[in-house]
């Protein structure tokens, strides 16, 4: 018995656990929060983070508390310190909002509390996830019958695809990497574009393939890998392509790279966290053409599909390669003839994150996803045009949802970004693009309206003038 139990007096807990009142109260608070997003400052209220630490922190409580008070404290001190990223005027990083149906689906799935690693423990969510994976392949027009895994985000989706690649390429050479590890294994070159996302390098590090062992192919002015600069290698290798550069939104040229890879028996992995969704919108589809011929794909649902965090998806053309990399078993884990999620994912126990994806695709349909993607791209074009009209320099070709803008020299650009982040009308993050400081505008939310774009443009112009 621990000391806390020895010293505690009998607890005076409510007879009923008050679930109904608690959930209704949480729903009311959540609703008020979401409605307030339209008018509140996008950045947290000044002083709110210090107050949060003061009121929610301190030593671990010894005694239980009333759950209603706990939820009340979370709302009172948590909500004001949140970033308004679920609203329509948040353009930082690449962060989508969350469709109403996906928030509600997430609540229901949380109430179900299913451990979606195993069919025997979670039949409903295992089956819903399989339907959602099939729909994702359809909506993205990727090879039907590919295997998939719901993971936390594109970081782990990249890990998942590259683990399948490592398995398949070494198995082809008679090496069982899951059993024997990489020490003494045949060499496995990895080729990436100069502008590959940081999560590719972390995934390679986690897989023992090394972040610095890679061959980096130079990129063009938009960050696209230059296929004529691919190295002269023979034998199995992994090539990482990018669909949607995090700064410019540009796509690596899939056609020539995949043709080059096929001639050499290389595996092509695509990091398409948000860019792969361009395949759904008819006017943008050509940007992401050819990526369907790859071997594995990593994408996010919590970005452009607008489901709540966290939700990424790893997809692999050859199900045996993914199963080979992720397969697991133990005497106590009961298997069934249907797909067992744990055989395809890095995790064993898992929340049912595919439920929100199902809800998003069921409410939007193919048409709704296409409209969402297209609308964001049109908003991005409007940002670019509006900023150019005011004499500011747009540094990228705006063909998707990303805009890079400089407000004169680096010093002034940084001042504008800082001022904008404090102002509260909207929120954008910064970057260095080809040696220059730039502000990134990423339009990824279903909630962004034309009025949000105009209000944000006005704030950018006003703060840029003030920083002159
Ligand atoms: C966001 C992003 C990632 C990482 O995704 P997470 O969901 O944050 O893990 C990887 N690649 C690209 C191109 C991205 O935009």
Image (cartoon, rainbow, N blue to C red):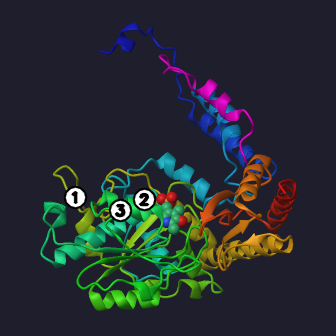
Q: Is residue 370 above or below residue 405?
A: below
> What stretch of residues is rendered in magenta?
43-66
Tag 2 residue: 125
- Is residue 366 covered in magenta? no
The reply to whether residue 350 is in sight is yes
The reply to whether residue 127 is in sight is no
How would you rate the neighbour count of disc 2 (Cα within 10 Å): few for under 14, some for 14-19, many for 20 or more?
many
Q: Nearer the viewer, residue 221 or 31?
A: 221
The residue tagged with tag 2: helix, strand or loop?
helix
Residue depicted at 47% across the width and 16% down the height: 62
Instruction: Give the foreground label among 1 and 3.
Output: 3
Cα separation between marks 1 and 3: 27 Å
| Residue 211: image tag | 3
> In the shown orientation, is residue 248 left or right of residue 466?
left
Residue depicted at 68% across the width and 44% down the height: 30
Position in image of residue 458 (x %, y %): 86, 61
Instruction: Give the foreground label among 1 and 2.
Output: 1
Quarter of the figure that contains the N terminus:
top left
| Residue 328: image tag | 1
């Amino acid at each position: 018995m621990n000391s806390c139990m020895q010293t505690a007096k009998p607890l005076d807990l409510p007879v009923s656990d008050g679930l109904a009142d608690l959930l209704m109260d949480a729903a009311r608070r959540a609703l008020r929060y979401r409605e307030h997003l339209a008018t509140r400052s996008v950045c947290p209220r000044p002083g709110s983070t210090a107050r949060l630490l003061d009121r929610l922190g301190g030593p671990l409580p010894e005694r239980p508390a009333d759950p209603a008070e706990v939820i009340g404290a979370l709302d009172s001190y948590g909500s004001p310190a949140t970033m308004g990223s679920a609203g329509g005027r948040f353009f930082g990083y690449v962060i989508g909002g969350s469709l109403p149906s996906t928030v509600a689906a997430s609540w229901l799935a949380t109430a179900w509390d299913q451990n979606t690693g195993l069919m025997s423990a979670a039949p409903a969510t295992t089956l819903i996830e399989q339907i959602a994976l099939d729909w994702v392949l359809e909506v993205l027009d990727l090879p039907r019958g590919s295997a998939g895994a719901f993971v936390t985000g594109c970081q782990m989706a990249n890990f998942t695809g590259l683990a399948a690649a490592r398995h398949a390429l070494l198995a082809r050479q008679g090496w069982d990497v899951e059993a024997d590890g990489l020490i003494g294994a045949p060499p496995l070159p990895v080729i990436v574009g100069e502008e590959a996302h940081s999560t590719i390098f972390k995934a390679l590090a986690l897989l023992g393939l090394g972040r610095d062992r890679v061959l980096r192919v130079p990129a063009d002015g938009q960050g696209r890998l230059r296929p004529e600069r691919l190295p002269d290698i023979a034998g199995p290798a992994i090539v990482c392509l990018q669909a949607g550069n995090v700064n410019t939104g540009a796509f690596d040229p899939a056609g020539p790279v995949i043709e080059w890879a096929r001639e050499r028996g290389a595996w092509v992995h695509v990091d398409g966290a948000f860019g792969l969704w361009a395949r759904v919108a008819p006017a943008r589809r050509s940007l992401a053409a050819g990526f369907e011929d790859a071997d594995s794909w990593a994408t996010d649902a919590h970005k452009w599909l607008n489901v709540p965090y966290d939700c990424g998806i790893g997809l692999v053309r050859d199900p045996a390669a993914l199963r080979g990399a992720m397969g697991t078993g133990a005497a106590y884990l009961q298997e069934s003839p249907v797909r067992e999620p744990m055989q395809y994912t890095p995790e064993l126990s898992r929340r049912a994150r595919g439920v929100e994806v199902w809800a998003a695709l069921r409410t939007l349909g193919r048409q709704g996803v296409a409209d969402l993607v297209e609308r964001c791209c049109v908003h991005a074009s409007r940002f670019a045009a509006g900023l150019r009209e005011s004499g500011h320099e747009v540094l990228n070709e705006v063909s998707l949802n990303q805009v890079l803008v400089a407000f004169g020299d680096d010093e002034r650009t940084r001042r504008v970004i800082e001022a904008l982040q404090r102002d509260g009308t909207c929120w954008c993050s910064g970057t260095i693009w080809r040696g220059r400081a730039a502000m990134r505008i990423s339009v990824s939310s279903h909630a962004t309206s034309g009025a949000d774009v105009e209000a944000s443009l006005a704030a950018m112009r006003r703060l840029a003038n003030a920083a002159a």
